[in-house]
């Protein structure tokens, strides 16, 4: 007889057999080599932070080369140009456009919701925070200039501009330094701070900073290196204690230690800086990290950075890393000991800048309060 014979009843599958048939079949086990490669590239939060940073750096350098070549062919940039507003503007564009491109590609690969905004650019009231940063930058730099003038370490000279040139150079330098703020904050406080926070511990941070200091020790000369060494040393004990205590905020502050030291390190290439100026650059970078912690985004930092540089270079006409800009409004000259006046390095080379940095940090915490910023891990899991 056949199964379709009406005299023979069909066997009905049991409930367990039905559920087993409907259940999804487990995929075949992956080869050991594939599992190792996936482990090497991917962590619990997606692409591992180290690979993300390496990819971003490679893309940034490639795009900078391309944009720089295009701008040079169009005669928009000139390596021998003096410190002018147009030279600074187009020079920063060769960094700004590649940074946007590199960050956008990395955000796309990492499937970040909001793309570029995911890198510490979300947060409450971004426009207000940016404007508050602008105000803070002008006030902080003005406080430093005022302290130097009060102590007799800086003298005011004649106004250098008149008529329409005042507004013209104010706008040009404003755009140039807005790009500076976007580039330096975009790389260090937006992308790097965010990415390292989700994938770094004390030992990785210690290794990175150790390599930076070793590079300076072997290949760089000059007392400006000591500014980086001081930055590295100041973060050592606090970051080690955070690691040992397994503090929830450990990743954020380990990342801050790295980005702060690296920010001081990149300024060692400025010929007019001394160790105080290098230390001040990194310390101000730390203030900007604190601003992310208390405001929830990097908008305050971008505004403050741009306004500080604008006030120093254009409005007061002070030296910036040893360079005095063409097209500045006021004129100031240092007087007395370079330790107090900053000398040819400008106001940022004065020891008084450390007091201003401390006041900025205290003011940030008092005004905004010490809040917990959005956690990169939680944000990444939501994507």
Image (tube, rainbow, N blue to C red):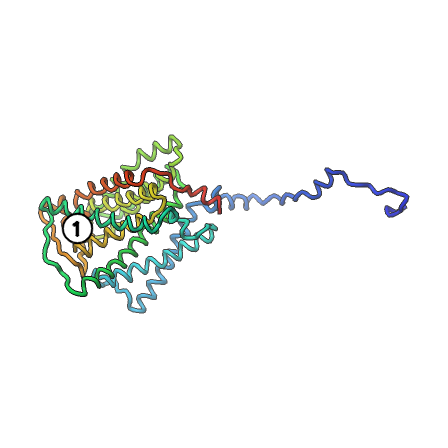
Left-right relation of 132 to 326:
right
Q: Residue furthest top?
A: 245
- Identify which residue is drawn at 29% across, 43% down: 286
Residue sitting nearer the eye, 90 or 230: 90
Above or below — where is 234 with respect to 165?
Answer: above
- Residue 17 on image: x %, y %: 73, 39
Count residues near mark 1 (Cα–Cα under 10 Å), then give few for <14, some for 14-19, many for 20+: many
Q: Is residue 289 visible?
A: yes
Occupied quadrant, residue 30: top right
- Badge 1 element: loop
Occupied quadrant, residue 163: bottom left
- Identify which residue is drawn at 34% across, 43% down: 295
Residue sitting nearer the eye, 93 or 27: 93
Left-right relation of 17 to 354:
right
- Residue 177 on image: x %, y %: 26, 56
- Identify which residue is drawn at 29% across, 39% down: 365
- Residue 121 on image: x %, y %: 38, 49
Left-right relation of 315 to 381:
left
- Identify which residue is drawn at 58% across, 45% down: 31
Q: Is residue 212 visible?
A: no
Residue sitting nearer the eye, 78 or 175: 175
- Residue 289 on image: x %, y %: 32, 43
Total labels: the figure holds: 1
Residue sitting nearer the eye, 1 or 205: 1
Tag 1 residue: 346
């Amino acid at each position: 007889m056949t199964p379709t014979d009406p005299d023979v009843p069909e066997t009905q599958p049991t409930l367990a057999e039905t559920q087993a048939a409907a259940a999804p079949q487990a995929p075949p086990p992956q080869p050991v080599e594939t599992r190792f490669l996936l482990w090497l590239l991917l962590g619990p939060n997606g692409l591992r932070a180290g690979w993300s940073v390496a990819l971003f750096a490679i893309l940034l350098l490639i795009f900078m080369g391309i944009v720089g070549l295009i701008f040079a062919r169009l005669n928009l940039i000139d390596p021998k140009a003096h410190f002018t507003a147009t030279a600074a503007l187009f020079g920063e564009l060769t960094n700004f456009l590649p940074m946007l491109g590199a960050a956008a590609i990395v955000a796309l690969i990492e499937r970040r919701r909001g793309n570029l905004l995911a890198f510490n650019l979300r947060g409450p009231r971004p426009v207000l925070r940016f404007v508050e940063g602008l105000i803070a930058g002008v006030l902080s730099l003005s406080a430093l200039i005022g302290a130097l003038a009060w102590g007799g370490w800086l003298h005011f000279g004649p106004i250098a501009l008149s008529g329409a040139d005042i507004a013209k150079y104010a706008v040009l330098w404003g755009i140039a330094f807005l790009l500076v703020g976007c580039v330096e904050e975009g790389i260090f406080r937006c992308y790097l701070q965010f990415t390292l926070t989700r994938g770094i511990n004390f030992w990785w941070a210690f290794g990175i900073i150790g390599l930076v200091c070793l590079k300076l020790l072997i290949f760089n000369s000059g007392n400006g290196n000591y500014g980086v060494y001081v930055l590295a040393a100041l973060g050592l004990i606090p970051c080690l204690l955070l690691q040992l205590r397994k503090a929830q905020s450990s990743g954020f502050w380990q990342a801050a230690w790295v980005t702060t030291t690296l920010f001081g390190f990149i300024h060692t290439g400025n010929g007019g800086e001394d160790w105080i100026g290098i230390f001040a650059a990194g310390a101000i970078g730390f203030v900007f990290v604190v601003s992310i912690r208390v405001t929830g985004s990097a908008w305050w930092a971008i505004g403050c950075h741009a306004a500080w540089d604008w006030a120093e270079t254009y409005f007061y006409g002070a030296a910036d890393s040893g360079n005095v800009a063409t097209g500045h409004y006021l004129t100031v000259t240092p007087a007395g000991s370079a330790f107090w006046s900053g000398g040819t390095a400008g106001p940022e080379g004065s020891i008084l800048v450390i007091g201003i940095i401390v006041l900025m940090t205290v003011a940030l915490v008092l005004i905004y309060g010490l809040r917990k910023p959005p956690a990169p891990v939680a944000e990444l899991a939501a994507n």
